[in-house]
Image (cartoon, rainbow, N blue to C red):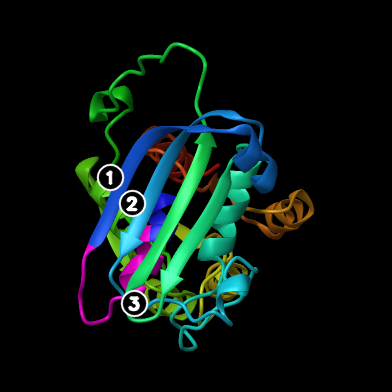
């Protein structure tokens, strides 16, 4: 959620600006909770504020609609804010936005505060999984996702070729076919989405091993993609351990011929 909101804020500041992320614990009273369709109580408030162009009043009511975008063709899918909204709602929360043309935009996310003691999770390090070697082709139109995923993979010893859309992914695969062992494709990208790029790759190499990455995949569509030959799925947002476990398993199976 924060990544999608931050990417949106970055795109709203093409000439530069200030991006501010903040968090706090707030108490949502009965009246406010009723207005927003939430139960009253304690919430974690996360805010993402930019000093960008702002959103005009006519556009504001539509920003959470799937596939709605004001960005130029090829610069976005119109799914970032829609995905953030769905994730927040699915976690019992609420997202609101304040914006003024020429002044910037602030998104506020409210999530129910956990009433349980925090669980100490083990620090994710390379020692938690077997060392991984190989070359992975990563395609995602979200710059922050590419950057973060690439850093995790390279830290674990994986060589990464990165593409910003499906068409570029196909080009990179053709140029590096002899060394690419695994391809990770975001499902929703411009210039060939993940499914289209997958089909092109299969035409080039029926044995290509592909993982589809997405914040939402309908079960029926996932089943169809698996039958078409997709190896597996990475559900966004994924953590380092999930990423590396999935990648390591795929690379081992490819080398074992399974």
Asked if disc 3 and disc 2 are in contact, CB closer than 8 Å, the reply is no
Relative to 5, 51 lies left or right = left
Nearest the camera: 184 or 219? 219
| 37 and 66: which is toward the camera | 37
Residue 76 in sight here = yes
Disc 3 or disc 2, which is closer to the eye? 2
Kindly identify which residue carries mark 1: 152
Which residue is located at x 48 percent, y 75 percent?
166
Q: Is residue 33 magenta?
A: no
Determine if residue 213 is in view. no
Marks 1 and 2: CB-CB under 8 Å? yes
Q: Is residue 244 left or right of residue 18?
A: right
Crowd tier of the residue under label 3, counting other residues whose Cα lies within 10 Å: few below 14, some 14–19, many 20 or above: few
Quarter occupied by residue 141: bottom left
Q: Earlier in the sequence, mark 3 or mark 2?
A: 2
Q: Which residue is mark 2?
A: 149
The span shown in magenta is 6-18
**Residue located beneath label 3 in the image:** 175
Question: Disc 1 on helix, strand or loop?
Answer: helix
Asked where in the image residue 165 lies, by quadrant, the reply is bottom left
């Amino acid at each position: 959620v924060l990544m999608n909101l931050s990417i949106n804020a970055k795109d709203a500041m093409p000439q530069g600006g200030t991006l501010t992320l903040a968090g706090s614990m707030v108490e949502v009273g009965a009246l406010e909770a009723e207005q927003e369709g939430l139960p009253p109580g304690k919430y974690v408030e996360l805010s993402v504020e930019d000093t960008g162009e702002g959103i005009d009043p006519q556009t504001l009511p539509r920003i959470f609609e799937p596939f709605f975008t004001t960005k130029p063709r090829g610069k976005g899918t119109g799914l970032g804010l829609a995905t953030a909204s769905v994730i927040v709602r699915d976690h019992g929360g609420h997202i609101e936005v304040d914006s003024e043309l020429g002044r910037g935009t602030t998104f506020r996310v409210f999530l129910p505060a956990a009433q349980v003691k925090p669980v100490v999770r083990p620090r994710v390090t390379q020692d938690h999984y077997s060392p991984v070697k190989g070359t992975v082709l990563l395609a995602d139109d979200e710059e922050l996702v590419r950057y973060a995923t690439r850093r995790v993979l390279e830290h674990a010893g994986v060589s990464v070729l990165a593409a910003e859309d499906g068409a570029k992914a196909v080009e990179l695969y053709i140029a590096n076919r002899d060394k690419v062992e695994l391809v990770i494709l975001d499902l929703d990208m411009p210039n060939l989405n993940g499914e289209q790029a997958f089909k092109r790759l299969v035409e080039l190499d029926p044995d290509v091993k592909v993982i589809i990455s997405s914040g939402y995949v309908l079960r029926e569509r996932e089943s169809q993609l698996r039958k078409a030959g997709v190896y597996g799925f990475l559900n966004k947002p994924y953590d380092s351990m999930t990423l590396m476990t999935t990648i390591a398993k795929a690379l081992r199976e490819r080398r074992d011929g399974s």
